[in-house]
Image (tube, helix red, strand yellow):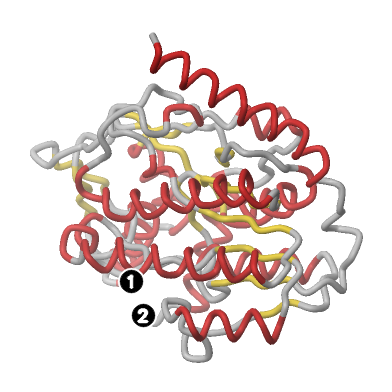
Amino acid sequence: DLILNFEVGIALYQSSIMGSQDAALSSSSFLEDKSAKVFVSGHRGLVGSAIVRKLTELGFTNLILRSHAELDLTRQSDVEAFFASTKPEYVIVAAAKVGGIHANNTYPADFIAINLQIQTNVIDSAYRNGAKKLLFLGSSCIYPKFAPQPIPEDALLTGPLEPTNEWYAIAKIAGIKMCQAYRIQHKWDAISGMPTNLYGPNDNFHPENSHVLPALMRRFHEAKVNGAKEVVVWGTGSPLREFLHVDDLADAVVFMMEKYSGLEHLNVGSGKEVTIKELAESMKEVVGFEGDLVWDSTKPDGTPRKLMDSSKLAALGWTPKVSLKDGLVDTYKWYLENVKQ
């Protein structure tokens, strides 16, 4: 009872200080000052490049961008020197080491160490150099393997993680907690957003290391080019998955920078589920593959369902705009123009 009362007391204390503090923290408008210095880390990746496109489209004129060759975010002294000299007013943390199951299983030390280094260096230096606001981006893999569906924000830390990507997940959970800690201790406006499965321009279409959507796109395209009779896909096609076009995430990032200031991380999803079978059939149509689609049911299906509950973000007024079909068409167009055949 004593422990329970202590925990309740801590929770009430945190919510009371955060309630009064959030009102004060969210007073500055992100969209009003298009000449403000905005640092987007990881600007060449799937997420970072979409955020840069969105900010440029909105008329932001002072984006601070550095390639990995120009600034290694794992090197603390380099990051500290960069922030001291550039003094960005807003920071979006889209840089991360990412990969599929194979990469996570093969390089667990890289996935935990590199991600912890990047986010710790960036968050701390942003605070110390007077940034007004920071947004940290994570991933839906932060949630327990057997989280309730749809997954609410408060499912965090309620059960064991999926073992194949726990190293990455633990780093991302640490990033959320770091933003919360700096918010509580320093009264600093650091927020976190957790996107669902993303796809779009600048995705990774590697034959072995990519996620299901770009992997299917590449497979159907190559089958079409080579005149193959069929495409074989693992499993039964029954698992349900949620996908969000990366341009919708970029839109949500701007929305959160402008409208959200709170201790809790926010889920960012489309709220729409599709079976892997429906995804594959849509992909076949978009790519224009004329052959047969064959399911190898001797291969594993994976988790039967993975959907995030994004109702908190929706209640603030944000909704996704890109339909899956339009998003696939857009992504395939980019693939044809940019991926070497």
Quarter assignment of residue 218? bottom left
- The x, y position of residue 324, in whole percent, is 54, 45
Asked whether, in this view, residue 32 is left or right of residue 154, the answer is right
Residue 276 lies, with reference to residue 312, above or below; the image says: below
Give the residue displayed 55% in from the left and 47% down from the top. 181
Which is more toward the observer, 250 or 68? 68
Q: Residue furthest bottom?
A: 70
- The x, y position of residue 171, in whole percent, is 37, 55
* Quadrant of the frame with the N terminus: top left
Residue 69 lies, with reference to residue 169, above or below; the image says: below
Which is more toward the observer, 73 or 205? 73
Q: Secondary structure at mark 1?
A: helix
Q: CA distance from mark 2 to mark 1?
A: 9 Å
Which is more toward the observer, 31 or 21? 21
Amino acid type, callout 1: Val
Give the residue displayed 50% in from the left and 70% down from the top. 121
- The x, y position of residue 107, in whole percent, is 20, 66
Q: Residue furthest right?
A: 32
Task: Find residue 113 and name its label.
Answer: none
Lower sequence index among marks 2 and 1: 1
Residue 231 lies, with reference to residue 208, above or below; the image says: above
Q: Residue furthest left?
A: 298
Return the residue at label 2.
341
Task: Find residue 225 and name its label.
Answer: 1
Amino acid type, callout 2: Gln
- The x, y position of residue 206, in whole percent, is 31, 70
Classify 10 Å Cα crowding around label 1: few (below 14), some (14-19), many (20 and above).
Answer: few
Give the residue displayed 39% in from the left and 53% down from the top. 213
Q: Are marks 2 and 1 in contact (CB under 8 Å)?
A: yes
Q: Tell me the mark number nearer the camera, choosing from 2 and 1.
A: 2
